[in-house]
Amino acid sequence: MTDTSRYDRRTVVRAIGGSTLAVGLAGCAGSEPTADDEPTDESTDDGDADADTGGDGDADAGGDADESVPDAVDSYLSDNDARGYDGAAVDATGQDTVTVSVGAGEIGLAFDPAAVRVDAGTTIVWEWTGEGGDHNVVAADESDFDVSPQEELIADAGHTTEETFDEAGNFLYLCEPHVGNGKVGAVIVE
């Protein structure tokens, strides 16, 4: 007499594999993006060139996009999937001070703008949004400048650090805890 309620090993393995696949696929539908998801354009800047100069030469980096990004900068930002980088740099030449948001974007893992062009002698002010956890601003190994404006990790909204760039070159920088999420940026100094 044959027992029809017994399963052979292959039948059990197939049943478990099919169930595992179904559960795995069900978890993919409708999930919210996380910081580990593929980087996307998270920039909160609306791209308007209406930066508030306040009469003192200070401005947020909300200027016009500049298509001429140096190869070293483009490679660095593209290779690291920089959030908010679309192949262009914000042109903030002519400004004395330019502000870059730290913790920008929907989940706070971007610099805004990701790339900015300034004149030599311009001061860059990095200002924390309070979003996305602890951040810092340190020079990348490929940078033309050996400065790290904020090595300590900071989470507080309104915290600022600054650096004045007196010589032409490319300042490539990153946020150490979030570099893998595309939190990198560049200052192109003319």
Image: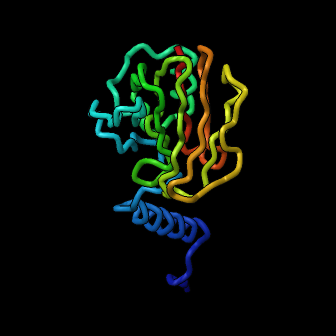
* Residue at the (40%, 65%) spot, across then down: 26
Q: Out of 187 and 181, give the one closest to the viewer.
A: 187
- Residue 96, percent across and down? 47, 27
* Residue at the (50%, 69%) spot, across then down: 15
Q: Out of 17 and 40, give the one closest to the viewer.
A: 40
* Residue at the (45%, 68%) spot, across then down: 23
- Residue 57, percent across and down? 41, 29
Q: Out of 187 and 118, give the one closest to the viewer.
A: 118
* Residue at the (52%, 13%) spot, across then down: 190
Residue 9 placement: quadrant? bottom right
Residue 76 placement: quadrant? top right
- Residue 72, percent across and down? 58, 17
Q: Out of 96 and 12, give the one closest to the viewer.
A: 96
Q: Looking at the picture, does residue 135 appear above or below residue 66?
A: below
On the question of residue 82 being in view, the answer is: yes
Q: Looking at the picture, does residue 110 appear above or below residue 168?
A: below
* Quarter containing the N terminus: bottom right
Give the residue furthest to the front.
55
Q: Looking at the picture, does residue 4 appear above or below residue 89?
A: below
On the question of residue 88 being in view, the answer is: no
- Residue 2, percent across and down? 54, 82
Specify how the rendered protein is coloured. rainbow
Count every numbered label the image shows and give the total: 0
